[in-house]
Each structure stands twice: as C-alpha cells, then as structure tokens.
Image: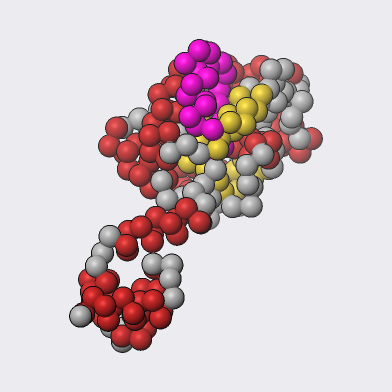
Amino acid sequence: MTGTLSLCATPIGNREDITYRVVRTLREADLIAAEDTRHSRVLLDLYDIHTPVTSYHEHNKYEKAEVLLQVLREGKNIALITDAGTPAISDPGEVLVRRCLEEGIRVSSLPGACACITALTMSGQSARRFCFEGFLPPDKKDRQEILEELKQETRTMILYEAPHHLKNTLAELLSALGNRPVTLCRELTKKFEEGMMTTLEEAVEYYRENDPRGEYVLVIAGKSRAEKEQEKSAHYLQMSLQEHMEMYLSAGMDKKEAMKAMAKDRNCSKRDIYRMLLEEGE
C-alpha cells in the first residue's frame, strides 16, 4: 500500500494557531516536506517535533515531487508544510498534490490557518461570493490581462501583496478598477494586526505619506450588478436602433423577440422601442 500525503496548515503569524491534529500528524509522519527547512525548524522545535525534514519549494517543485512520490509509493507517509498557512494556496504544493492524485496516492488536507480566509472574514466586505487571485503575475502583459478580467468581476476579490510592491499595485488597481471599496489587511494574527477599510483612491493617497509595513491581503469589492447593467445600457445606446435590431435578427430571433431584448438592453419598454423604430423609419 502507498503512503498518504497530508497537507498540514501552519500558523500565518501567531504560533498558537496550529491544530492538535496537525501537531500529531507532523510527529507521526515518516517525513516532513517543508518550503524552508530552517524557517520550519523553529516551529517544529517549539512543538517538540523531531520528524526528518526535507526541502520542497518553488525552485525544485517538479524534480523533488518525483522523489517524494517514490517515498509515498514505498508506503511511507509525508506531511507537507509551507512557511505559513495552508499548502497549495499560492504555493508549489499544488504540483505534488496533482501528481499524487494522478497516481492514485491518497491526499488528505488538514484544516487550519489561511491568510485569504482570515482577511476576508475580518474585512467587512461581502463574503457571500468571492474569488482568490493571490499575487498578480510579475509579467507586464499577463498582469494587464488579469486586471482587464477583474474589471468585470462582481465577486469580492482577494489579492496578496508584499510591502515593497504595494504602492504600485494599488495605483494599478485604481487605474483598472476605478475607485472601489477595499480593506487592506496586514500582519494577520500578529501583535500589530490591522484591517483598514477604505477605498482604492484613499489607499493610494494614504501610502504616499506612509510606508507599507508587513505582508498585505487586499480584499476588494466587486463591481455591482447595477453598475454592470448601466455599462451594458450605455454600450447599446451607442448603437442605432436598426443596428441593434439587426444584431438580434442575425442571431435568429424574430422581430418580437428582438424588440423585447432591445427594451431590456436599453432599460425601456417594448412599446418605446416600437415607437422609436417607427419614428426612425419615417
């Protein structure tokens, strides 16, 4: 029988934020795969965990995954930890998880600390529907494509950012998304934890005078449905009635269906559409 890969969430700041189950699993595993072995050793020593540790990080995630798979094939159990939080969230652990599942090796995820959920719940922004973007890509073209997609996002958006990039990222977000509500969460679970509820415009202004400190999670309000409807109506109002009608007729609608769709697009009644079409045809 093969072993089990256990994804063990570790504290994102306060070292008390670790579960009994994670501590037990780390003690009982045959091997711990850690993002930074020196960083993790501090936590392991604190909880009197003496399991052998090996490195597994962004720069060796593919080749080391194959080494770890062989250990699992031999029936040994591996506990995977990241520097902070839940493995596989903005973390190379997703590569190892995928390879295990491809080979039918059991993967178990042990719940615990996760920065994006911690920030969302304390942000004051809507938590009913949300999407996690993580760090924006460093490549300029990829970054612009992602920002373009986020313009139309109606769900609450969660992004990570390092302090030395925060000012530029806030300026880019303001330019791309407009002046959205945002909560800037930093130093989560630590002594100087803070959640600053503001707007992107005010945040840009604030950090002109204040230096960012600590790792940030940005929780940004999505575009409202009312705003999307207004933009949609504005787009159709730029078309002539005949162009608008032809768009739907060419899609296979009859005139009655087309006028109904046009009325919805232009936020008016079907009777108004009929009247305007008659006047335009005179």
Q: Residue at x 55, y 23 (%)?
A: 215
As for residue 216 lying within the magenta part, the answer is yes
Q: Which residues are magenta?
A: 199-220
Depth check: 273 or 168 in front?
Answer: 273
Task: Decide: is 248 above or below 77.
Answer: below
In this view, which residue lies farthest toward the left? 282
The answer to whether residue 197 is seen in the rendering is yes
Q: Along the horizontal axis of the image, is 80 left or right of 253?
A: right
Q: Position of residue 55 (x, y in %)?
A: 51, 26
Depth check: 171 or 243 in front?
Answer: 243
Quarter of the image with the C terminus is: bottom left
Task: Decide: is 151 above or below 186.
Answer: below
Q: Residue at x 65, y 28 (%)?
A: 195
Q: Residue at x 45, y 28 (%)?
A: 170
As for residue 224 lying within the magenta part, the answer is no
Q: Residue at x 69, y 36 (%)?
A: 122
